[in-house]
Amino acid sequence: MKEKEVTNAVKTYFEEKGYFSPKREFNIGVRPDVVAFRWKNEYEIEAFAVECKSTRKLRSLIETGLTQAREYQLAFPYVYLASPKLEEKPLEILKNTLSVLRMGLLSVDENSIVEEEMKASISPRLSYGEFLFKVRQRAVAILVYKEVVGDSFDINVQDSEEIHCYIKEAANFLLSNTGPRDNYYFGICIEKQENVKQTLGKIEAKHFHKLLTDLPEIKTIIW
């Protein structure tokens, strides 16, 4: 089984559970193979990072858990290691190792069916500041913008790197086109829930998207 097959199976696994998983890498200084997030309530975001491997070699998987996947625990509350399904004995050894790190384990069989062998616990290394600035704020921006543009999300946002969040700025959620002559920005102060509800709750998504796409060149929107 190739690593891409493991990665695709894991992304599908989370999407079928109602999570959003960006197509491109979610770069936070390190690059998890899969990230997935969704609203838990009106404020909280559930966020997962997964390191995917195609190997069944126990030593390699343990080393990955102790190095690559462990780095994700600074910014993500829940971290998983994913690999092709192991035999019973190496599986138990790997689970025992990952349990000490509070990581979860996902197995992928030859039919790309994912099984949660062990649930991840809250990361013991989690830094709230790292989570807030690198994961939560960016995830909120992506989820809100996705809700606004609907089916056009993948067309208009080819790379999640194009979305930025700054909690110290008045416009907390910024989206800018990347064309050489475009200069458009879409901003919402997402620190105040009432701003999001008042702005997005009163506009039809397709109509708002049309307003954005019909704007003349070299013009800025400020909200």
Image (cartoon, rainbow, N blue to C red):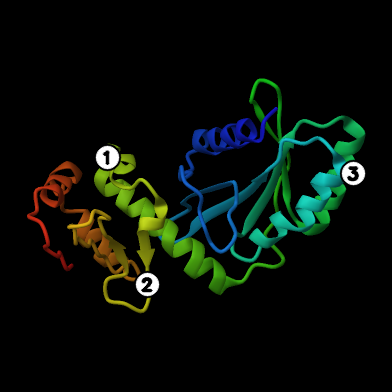
Report how far apart the C-alphas of labels 1 and 2 lie in the structure: 24 Å
Judged from the image, the secondary structure of the residue bearing numbered disc 3 is helix
Q: Horizontal and vertical percent for residue 119?
A: 71, 46
- Judged left or right of residue 69, residue 94 is right
* Along the viewing direction, whichever of 184 and 41 lies nearer the viewer: 184
The residue depicted at 46 percent of the width and 45 percent of the height is: 22
Crowd tier of the residue under label 2, counting other residues whose Cα lies within 10 Å: few below 14, some 14–19, many 20 or above:
some
What residue would you read off at disc 1? 152
- Judged left or right of residue 91, residue 20 is left
The residue depicted at 48 percent of the width and 57 percent of the height is: 45
Crowd tier of the residue under label 1, counting other residues whose Cα lies within 10 Å: few below 14, some 14–19, many 20 or above:
few
Q: In which quadrant is the N terminus drawn?
A: top right
The residue depicted at 77 percent of the width and 30 percent of the height is: 85
What residue would you read off at disc 3? 93
- Give, as a three-letter code, the residue at label 2: Tyr
Judged from the image, the secondary structure of the residue bearing numbered disc 2 is loop
Q: Horizontal and vertical percent for residue 205?
A: 20, 45
Report how far apart the C-alphas of labels 1 and 3 lie in the structure: 45 Å
- Give, as a three-letter code, the residue at label 3: Ile
